[in-house]
Amino acid sequence: MTVVDIPGSKSVTARALFLAAAAAGTTTLLRPLRSDDTEGFAEGLGRLGYRVDREPDAWRVGGRPQGPAVSEADVYCRDGATTARFLPTLAAAGASGTYRFDASPQMRRRPLAPLTDALRALGVDLRHEEAEGHHPLRIAAAGIKGGEVTLDAGESSQYLTALLMLGPLTAEGLRITVTDLVSAPYVEITLAMMRGFGAEVTREGDTFTVPPGGYRATTYAVEPDASTASYFFAAAALSPGREVTVPGLGAGALQGDLRFVDVLERMGAQVRVTPDSTTVRGTGTLNGLTVNMRDISDTMPTLAAIAPYAAGPVRIEDVANTRVKECDRLEACAENLRRMGVTVATGADWIEIRPGTPRPTEIATHGDHRMAMSFAVTSLRTGPGVTFDDPGCVRKTFPAFHEAFAALQRAW
């Protein structure tokens, strides 16, 4: 049995940083993810005047329920979507201050309008400085009364998460009606974590009611990143007789992306989930299938990368939102697979991959960490020669990925 220690969840770490900053008291985060995204989030909090003390396995955040400690700040969000969406929302709840947010060219291209439109509907003085609905933006904070708002979260569940976490910081609470929602399990993470910080949300159908009252500080353990674990689980599924166990991700895990192992099981891998860990073992069988990945779309590239080795076609459906991630992931997967000699078709929200024998090539990552990590799994069966035009893009979520993946191969 090969045990792989996966770094902390990016999604959980980002939410925990927001909640800790908003809470009354000092929160300790245990085993948070240290990556470009989360370091950027912590740095942004620092620019806003929050105290964040970072040690290797524990970060301590001094909460400020009243909002940022500075009246002016210029915050650079790097490539981080959670940073770029959550921090402006947090700052907007402050009692007073003017805050400017900008991001990398990649993040500037990603949409923001559903969230900023909702904030404006709640009375926030917010201005996009260049392209409407995109960074950079400027916020003049004056507190938020609260009330009712309608939100389209069909592009990203992060819009809804930002508003949910905002709710307890408003004077009267929020009532959020969602017209569309993608990646719903990420919202369940948010609701569970808000409970952990003392805020309870109720839901009736498509409407979420968030009472005022703020958050309380706590000690919060960050579980391993299920999206990152998918590459190691896929590697096991692709390798007959090999298995990978990830401790810390078990039956009670918050992250919906752990359901990726259910897809591998449907394809023929053996999967064992205990309360404290998940194990995937390759059987030598990898069947084709049609699968809806709307709720676990961050693992779509992982499946696409091993799909050519299946005995039949692999069709992945309902993943239109992957076109507005770090890159257009549907087309990026198709492009790289075609460069490997694999037959691929795509539509507005689907990709279908035919069985084939991928040949080594240089992978076009488009600066997207998931392209690099996914096609590292493909390379297990291509033989030497797979290279990456930007191998360092993995720093976004797992700076030591290439070393960890090489260690896995050596262990086998």
Image (cartoon, rainbow, N blue to C red):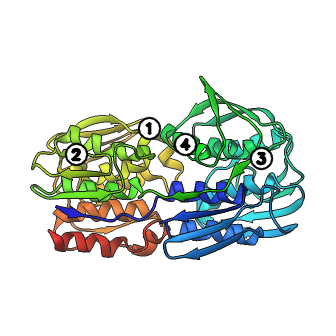
**Sequence-wise, which precedes: disc 2 or disc 3?**
3
Q: Provide the secondary structure element on which disc 2 rests.
A: strand
Image coordinates of residue 165 in percent, x first then y, are: 67, 46
- Residue linked to disc 3: 169
Q: Provide the secondary structure element on which disc 4 rests.
A: helix
Q: Provide the secondary structure element on which disc 1 rests.
A: helix
Q: Nearer the viewer, residue 44 or 170?
A: 170
Mark 2 vs mark 3, CA separation in Å: 41 Å
- Taking 341 as reference, is 60 above or below it? below
- Taking 4 as reference, is 56 above or below it? below
Q: Amino acid at mark 1?
A: Arg
**Sequence-wise, which precedes: disc 2 or disc 1?**
2
Image coordinates of residue 239 in percent, x first then y, are: 14, 57
Tell me the crowding category of disc 2: few under 14, some 14 to 19, or many 20 or more residues within 10 angstroms, Cα based: some
Q: Nearer the viewer, mark 2 or mark 1?
A: 2
Q: Amino acid at mark 4?
A: Ala
